[in-house]
Structures are given as structure tokens and as C-alpha cells.
Amino acid sequence: EKNKDHYKRILAFIWVPLGDDSNNTTKRGKKPPKSSNSNSQSWLCINEGLVASGLAHSYSPSRSKKVHCHDKLLGLQKVARVHKIGQWKSFKDYDAIVTPTGSAFHKCKKKRSTASDCKHLARSKNLTVIAVSEAYDKGLHPCRNCFG
């Protein structure tokens, strides 16, 4: 199904009305997709608010399936991380391994090394070590095998 990831989790954007404001824009939200039949209300995207508050990560199921407002969500996530908001309060950067085409980052066995125990990297070539903060800024997510 198009609204689920490969773990069958529902992936959706949640929009809530903000009242009678007739300009149809909000500080953090956007008006919902054009299919909305309301022309006189402003809308807030809850997903954007959660990411900006450090209560959620921006997530895209794969590099080929970009979600609505993906770049905006990544920007809000970076601001939350830099300002140590919510779950980012205790974040400490460290090295991670990435592939040229993957959508996840992986654990390094040791600092600045592409050695890893991850089964997903067993046959991968052209591995690169980057900071986890950079991986998040690129829209990558933690490997489910490495970070379980």
C-alpha cells in the first residue's frame, strides 16, 4: 500500500484547523493538499510541529519515495538538533558508515573506520564515514540491524 512502509506502519501527514484565519497559512504549517474543501481556514501540519519540537525524526521510507515537505522537515529537524530541543537534548555526534545509494546509516566498529558488523554492508562497496548529524541532515535513518 502506498501509505505504509515495508514494516506496514502507516505513514501520513496530519493537518488540524487553526480557526477562522482567512489567509490559509500558518507560522509552522501549510494548508493541506488541494483536495481540501475548506477555503477559509488555516491549517497546521502536526508532523512539522513534532519534528520542530524534537519529538520526532523526519523519516522517508527510501530515497526514491520522498515525502511531502521532506526538505522542510529536514530543516526543522536540524534546527531542533542544533538547539538541543526534545530528543536532541543529549545528542552527541559520532561516526557512521553510509553507502552511496542507501537510505540508512550504520555503526562503525571503531572511529573513522568503515569496518562494521552490519549484515546489510557485507557486500557493499564505496563505503564512507560521516558524522551522524550529517547523515540525519541528508535524510538518512539509523539502520534497523545496527541500532535495533
Image: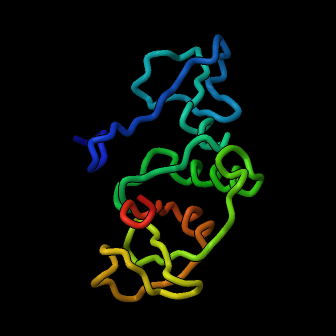
Depth check: 75 or 40 in front? 75
- In the picture, measured across the screen, residue 57 lies left or right of residue 78, that is left
Residue at the limit of the structure toward the right, as seen here: 83
Q: State the scheme by which the image is colored.
A: rainbow
- Does residue 19 sit above or below 31 in this rendering? above
Q: In this rendering, is residue 53 above or below 70?
A: above
Q: Position of residue 67 (x, y in %)?
A: 43, 48
**Quarter occupied by residue 41:** top right
Residue 118, percent from left and from top: 36, 75
Task: Say which quadrant the N terminus sits in.
Answer: top left
Look at the image and tell me in which quarter the C terminus lies: bottom left
In this rendered view, identify the residue nearer to me: 119 or 62: 119
Residue at x-position 70% and y-position 50%: 80
Residue in the picture at 49% in, 81% down: 109
Against 147, is 50 above or below?
Answer: above
In the displayed orientation, state which residue is furthest to the left: 1
Q: Is residue 79 left or right of residue 46?
A: right
Q: Is residue 119 above or below residue 126?
A: above
Is 10 on the left or on the right of 88, as rendered?
Answer: left
- The answer to whether 28 appears left or right of 118 in the picture is right
> Which residue is painted at 55% across and 54% down in the image?
71
> Toward the viewer: 70 or 104?
104
Q: At 40% from the left edge and 88% from the top edge, which residue is drawn?
A: 126
- Position in image of residue 10 (x %, y %): 34, 37
